[in-house]
Image (spheres, helix red, strand yellow):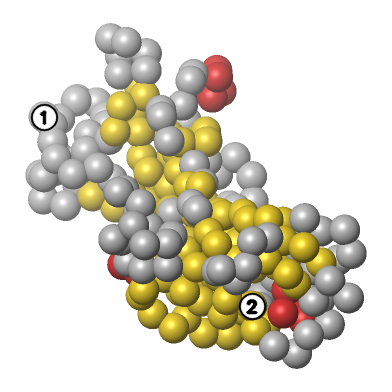
């Protein structure tokens, strides 16, 4: 079944996170399966971050394309990477077919580092905080959607520099509420020659996002 990994992933997904699993029962039951369906633990294609989200897709036998795998109520099945990082658990699976856990693609969001300072001046040795506005759009409500505990910011975007978030405000005057958070400038670990700062995080639905903005390193 490994050839299924070469099928074009659905829009907004970076590719498969699990190996394909062919499920068959003899005799074949009627679908959807009664009650809560079945729970499945599927091996991942490599080590992944525990707690990350995967969405379950099945291969449509008529088109050979991926379509969402619904549960007994018709809602898409979502799974979670287990503690060891090498399996994903999916609950309420109500249809048996060839299934694959798909990795949601990272959402690109707009950010404004040190709003009002363009490009933002950063002094890496400063003991202060660097404010970063996560900007909302028609499809991304930053104050409502961002899991603030997951935010990282700095030279690579993986720096654990979050100090606090000060709440919603319309930073860019577009009528949408933005989320302003403050990061420890030293911990952000900017380097001479850096020309952008990177912010990473997850939404409350466990979807990864990333934003970048221009900076200027000053002594």
Q: Closer to the camera, 61 or 190?
A: 190
Mark 1 secondary-structure assignment: loop
Q: Position of residue 74 (x, y in %)?
A: 14, 40
Q: Position of residue 18 (x, y in %)?
A: 51, 39
The residue singled out by tag 2 in the image is 130
Left or right, 117 with respect to 56, comes to right
Answer whether residue 67 is visible to the viewer in this image: yes
Label 1: how many residues lie within 10 Å, few (<14), some (14-19) or many (20+)? few
Residue 204 can be seen in this image: no
Q: Nearer the viewer, residue 44 or 181?
A: 181
What is the quadrant of the C terminus in the image? bottom right
Q: Position of residue 15 (x, y in %)?
A: 52, 33
- Mark 2 vs mark 1, CA separation in Å: 58 Å
N-terminal of the two: label 2 or label 1? 1
Give the foreground label among 2 and 1: 2
Q: Residue at x 37, y 13 (%)?
A: 64
Please state if 36 lies on the left or on the right of 137 as rendered: left
> Is 195 situated above or below 16?
below
Identify which residue is drawn at 77% across, 55% down.
Answer: 195
Q: Which residue is mark 1?
A: 30
Residue found at x 39% / y 80%: 167
Q: Is residue 111 left or right of residue 176?
A: right
Q: Residues within 10 Å of mark 2 (few under 14, many from 20)?
A: many
Position of 158 relative to 13 (above/below) = below
Where residue 215 sits, quadrant-wise, is bottom right
User: x, y percentage for residue 17?
Assistant: 52, 41
Q: Nearer the viewer, residue 64 or 33?
A: 64
| Element on which disc 2 rests | strand
**Residue, far top:** 62
């Amino acid at each position: 079944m490994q050839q299924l990994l070469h099928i074009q992933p659905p829009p907004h997904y970076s590719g498969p996170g699990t190996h394909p699993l062919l499920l068959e029962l003899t005799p074949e039951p009627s679908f959807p399966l009664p009650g809560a369906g079945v729970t499945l633990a599927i091996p991942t294609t490599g080590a992944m971050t525990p707690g990350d989200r995967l969405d379950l897709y099945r291969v449509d036998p008529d088109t050979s394309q991926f379509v969402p795998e619904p549960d007994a109520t018709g809602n898409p099945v979502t799974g979670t990477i287990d503690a060891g990082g090498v399996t994903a658990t999916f609950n309420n699976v109500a249809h048996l077919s060839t299934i694959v856990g798909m990795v949601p693609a990272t959402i690109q969001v707009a950010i404004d580092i040190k709003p009002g300072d363009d490009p933002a001046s950063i002094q890496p040795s400063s003991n202060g905080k660097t404010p970063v506005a996560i900007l909302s759009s028609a499809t991304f409500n930053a104050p409502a959607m961002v899991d603030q505990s997951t935010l990282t910011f700095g030279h690579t975007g993986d720096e654990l520099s979050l100090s606090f978030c000060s709440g919603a405000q319309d930073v860019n005057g577009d009528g949408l509420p933005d989320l302003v958070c403050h990061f420890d400038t030293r911990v952000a670990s900017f380097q001479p020659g850096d020309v952008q700062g990177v912010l990473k995080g997850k939404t409350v639905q466990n979807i990864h996002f990333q934003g970048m903005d221009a900076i200027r390193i000053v002594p």
